[in-house]
Image (cartoon, grey):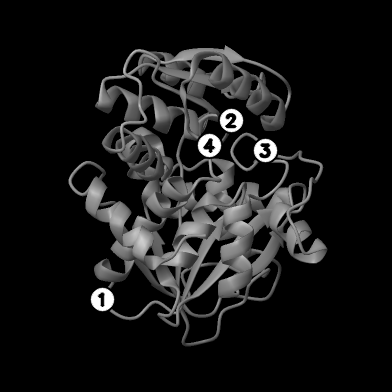
Amino acid sequence: MISRDDVEAAREQTAGLVRVTPVLEAGRGALPLGGPAGRVPGELVLKLELLQHTGSFKARGALHRVLSARAAGRLDPDVGVVVASGGNAGLAVAWAAARAGVPATVVVPERAPVVKVARLRELGATVVLAGAEYAEAQAVAQEHRERTGALWCHAYDQPEVAAGAGTLALELLEQVARRVDTVVVAVGGGGLVAGVAAALEGTGTRVVGAEPVRAPTLHAALAAGTPTDVAVSGVAADSLGARRVGEIAFDVARRTGVVPVLVEDADIVAARALLWREWRTVVEHGAAAALAALTAGSYVPGADERVAVVLCGANTDPTDL
């Protein structure tokens, strides 16, 4: 459904409007492997996408979606945009709408972190709290779209959104000193893994999708042969809380051979604490899931493998680190 050409087009449209986020080359043996097994093999690079506008990678896709719609004459400046989001996509859409000078309505689950809801309001969005899960919030957002004609901005399952997310992978390849063998990303609804895998298709770089055991959307889809609903819970549910992986992510993951791995909540918590302890980097639990794939041994790189981990978001309460 999306290709590298789509990602290249997204990069051209958003150039100079989104941040080029830095990379940290942590080096060889930089991570402890859980238990007595020593260090994680290979060489580690951290892509600090948590420093993106609004604190997550979502700004890339949201801006591409809004600008594309405006260019095509599909954005009503009086009605604006609507999105259902656990927080990060809502922040990104609110920011993108403000850049375009149009209103934004963001529907979030009732459990959305207070810090995200407060920031949404600071960005000028109208915030609606609805339901316990993302799927319930989405139903309310869809009703708003049908009633008002607002531009629908999906949190992850739209071509412009996924292609925009993939621009960080093109950026990453240009930033590192040597070839990247593997890129590890967290998976919720799948917009990030779809964009990254599409961007890297044909380059020989492997993509690993890490998701919580308690929200295994990609695993369930690949096992069933189609996206399917799963029960969602756990420490990362506020950002990796989609009930099913998107059609775009499923298509790209199956087409490009994304490697799916699962991580336990305890390993996510430990990886988040490690990032703070070793690099003074504060990330949300969803972002830490990608690093947990390595520290928990869910994905074990080769001795000479160069692995880049995308730290995709920082909208979290740091007081529990």
Which of label 4 and label 1 is nearer to you?
A: 4
Which secondary structure lies at badge 2? loop
Q: Are marks 4 and 3 in contact (CB under 8 Å)?
A: no
Q: CA distance from mark 2 to mark 3?
A: 9 Å
**Residue 103 in the image: above or below residue 165:** above
Q: Earlier in the sequence, mark 1 or mark 3?
A: 1
Look at mark 2 in the image and give the residue it sits on: 86
Q: Which x, y percent locates residue 55?
A: 39, 37
Q: Which residue is mark 3?
A: 237
Between marks 4 and 1, how big is the CA–CA gap?
35 Å
Q: Could you say where residue 209 lies in the image, as x and y percent from the top left?
A: 60, 62
Amino acid at pointer 1: Ala
Residue pictured at 65% horizontal, 24% vertical: 137
**What amino acid does circle 4 point to?**
His
| Residue corresponding to mark 4 | 154
Q: In 3D space, how far apart are the residues under numbered discs 4 and 3 (Cα atoms)?
A: 18 Å
The answer to whether residue 172 of the structure is visible from this angle is yes
Label 1 to label 3: alpha-carbon separation: 35 Å
Left or right of 126 on screen, residue 133: right
Say if mark 1 contacts mark 2, CB within 8 Å: no
- Could you tell me which secondary element the residue under label 3 belongs to? loop
Q: Are marks 2 and 3 in contact (CB under 8 Å)?
A: yes
Q: Is residue 5 left or right of residue 232?
A: left
In-image side of 311 versus 71 (left or right): right
The amino acid on which the numbered mark 2 sits, given as a three-letter code, is Gly
Q: Quadrant of residue 176?
A: bottom left
Q: CA distance from mark 2 to mark 4?
A: 12 Å
Q: Which residue is mark 1?
A: 177
Q: Residue furthest front?
A: 73
* Other-residue count near label 2 (Cα within 10 Å), few / some / many at <14 / 14–19 / ≥20: many
Of mark 4 and mark 3, the one earlier in the sequence is 4
